[in-house]
Image (cartoon, helix red, strand yellow):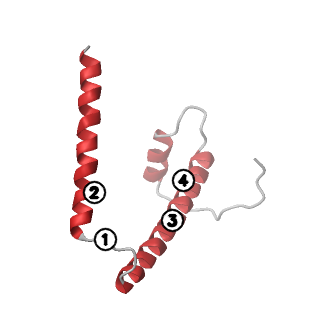
Amino acid sequence: MSRSATLPPIRVTSETKASLEAVLREGESLTQFIENAVRQEAEFRAEQKAAVARAKKALRLADKGVGLMSADDFLAGMQERAQSAQHRIRLAVAAKNK
């Protein structure tokens, strides 16, 4: 992987640095750890932003009455899913006990 940019240096306490170094995997550098942490946090925030956008869209549609199902239909669907899951579990237990 080629690197073309740098991140600003950060100052931490010696205790923080020591605790980070204590959790490094074999062969992993502190720089790699920080780079991975920054990348993961950026990905998480992007996913979070997308999820909030989807939720806002769903709320706008719900306010307009679009795409909603009745409580009875919802509960019936949940009951069906629960029964299906129970059936799969029973089959798995029976297969394991053979």
30 up-or-down from 70: above or below: above
Amino acid on which disc 4 is placed: Ala
Residue under pointer 4 = 37
Q: Position of residue 79 (x, y in %)?
A: 22, 52
Disc on the earlier residue, 4 or 3: 4
**Residue denoted by label 3:** 45
Amino acid tagged 3: Arg
Query: Which disc number belongs to residue 78?
Result: none
Is 4 in front, or is 79?
A: 79
- Label 1 SS: loop
Choose top left, top right, bottom left or bottom right for residue 70.
bottom left
Residues packed near mark 1 inside 10 Å, few (<14), some (14 to 19) or many (20 plus)? few
Q: Position of residue 36 (x, y in %)?
A: 58, 50
Marks 1 and 2 in Cβ contact (< 8 Å): yes
Whole-Å distance between the Cαs marked 1 and 4?
41 Å
Give the mark, 4 or 2, whose residue is nearer the N terminus.
4
| Residue with the mark numbered 1 | 69
Asked whether residue 15 appears in the rendered view, the answer is yes
The numbered disc on residue 77 is 2
Gap between marks 1 and 3 measured at Cα: 31 Å
The residue type indicated by label 2 comes to: Gly
**Residue displayed at 50% across by 42% down:** 21
Q: Secondary structure at mark 4?
A: helix
Report the Cα–Cα distance between label 2 and label 3: 32 Å
> Which one is earlier in the sequence, the residue at label 2 or at label 3?
3
Q: Residue at the location (48% across, 46% down)?
A: 20
